[in-house]
Amino acid sequence: MELIKNTNFDFLSKRKIFYVFSTSLIIIGLIFLIIKGEKNFGVDFVGGDLINIEFKEKIDIVTLRKLISEIKIGSFTVQELGTTKKNYLMRLPSKTSDIVIQKLKEKFGDTFTVKGKSVISPSMSITLRKKALKAFLIGLIGILIYLTIRFEFKFAVGATIAVFHDILIVLSVLILTGKQIDGMIIAGLLTIVGYSVNDTVVIFDRIRENIRKTRSTDYLSVFNKSINETLSRTLLTVLTTLFVVFTIFLFGGETLHNFAFCLMIGFIFGTYSSIFIASAIVIDWIEKSSSRLKI
């Protein structure tokens, strides 16, 4: 099945425009990251309060989330424990547990019990940050090694920079839209890495195939031709995945809302970077080094 046929778009001749667009968005995101500081991060990363509430009667989780959101304390999570709809675990920003408990008393009176109350240590959060960064760096190194073996070093660098670009773009969009970065977002970012690399590899495979067929050194034409030939497949892939993720975004509940939003942005920019960043970097490298590809 092909969504579009016989396209002949000149994707790479305007690549500097896309460099400027991506760089500008990333810089703006980093500026807001610095300005907002710890407000960008959820409880998982900056520490906070943890309370365990048990109700005498069944309470819907949506009701609890709506009630707490009215307090405007920032990012929080409410997790149901078991299937009774009576026991809930709440992760809250630091020093807000008493405010939340008071709000629950105003709404529900004495129909609940605080079974546990503790503080999530910031030291735990620092450990989480280090582990998240370590996982990301190990992933990038693995991608670099794998693509160097499968293609060659120029392609590996192009794909790795594109993945790093995608992560920074997604983080920038999340920061600019007021989303807080937590454990779910980290899971989303790692998912985006896999998607972006897969999309890039499909285009690189077609580029290699066309270079071997034509033995042409007009790499700009070969790259554009290869991107056009895989365009239908690329669009079908991103549209089908976006359909699923958008469904989760709409109906997955508050817990999955930010995760789904992260994936939507990541899949869109993962597709964008496969076309306008990864391939463009390889072209620029070839032109500056005046070397031929060995694939």
Image (cartoon, rainbow, N blue to C red):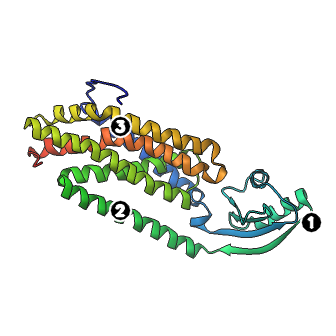
Q: Earlier in the sequence, mark 2 or mark 3?
A: 2
Q: Given contact means CB atoms under 8 Å apart, are the residues at marks 2 and 3 in contact?
A: no
Q: Which image quarter: residue 123?
A: bottom right
- Disc 3 crowd, CA 10 A, few/some/many (<14, 14-19, 20+): many
Q: Nearer the viewer, residue 116 or 94?
A: 116
Residue depicted at 46% across the width and 38% down the height: 240
Pick whichever, 15 or 159, lies toward us. Answer: 159
Residue 125 is drawn in which quadrant? bottom right
Mark identifier at residue 110: 1
Residue 17 visible at all: yes
| Residue of label 2 | 139
Return the mark for residue 234.
3
Q: Earlier in the sequence, mark 3 or mark 1?
A: 1
Mark 1: amino acid: Asp
Tell me which amino acid carries mark 2.
Gly
Query: In this orientation, does residue 216 appear?
Result: no
Q: What distance separates the C-alpha of mark 2 from that of mark 1?
A: 50 Å
Q: Residues within 10 Å of mark 1 (few under 14, many from 20)?
A: few
Q: Residue furthest right?
A: 109
Secondary structure at numbered mark 2: helix
Q: Is residue 227 above or below residue 292?
A: above
The numbered mark, 2 or 1, whose residue comes first in the sequence reads 1
Please tell me whether residue 135 is drawn above or below residue 236 in the rendered image. below
* Secondary structure at numbered mark 3: helix
Residue 187, percent from left and from top: 50, 58
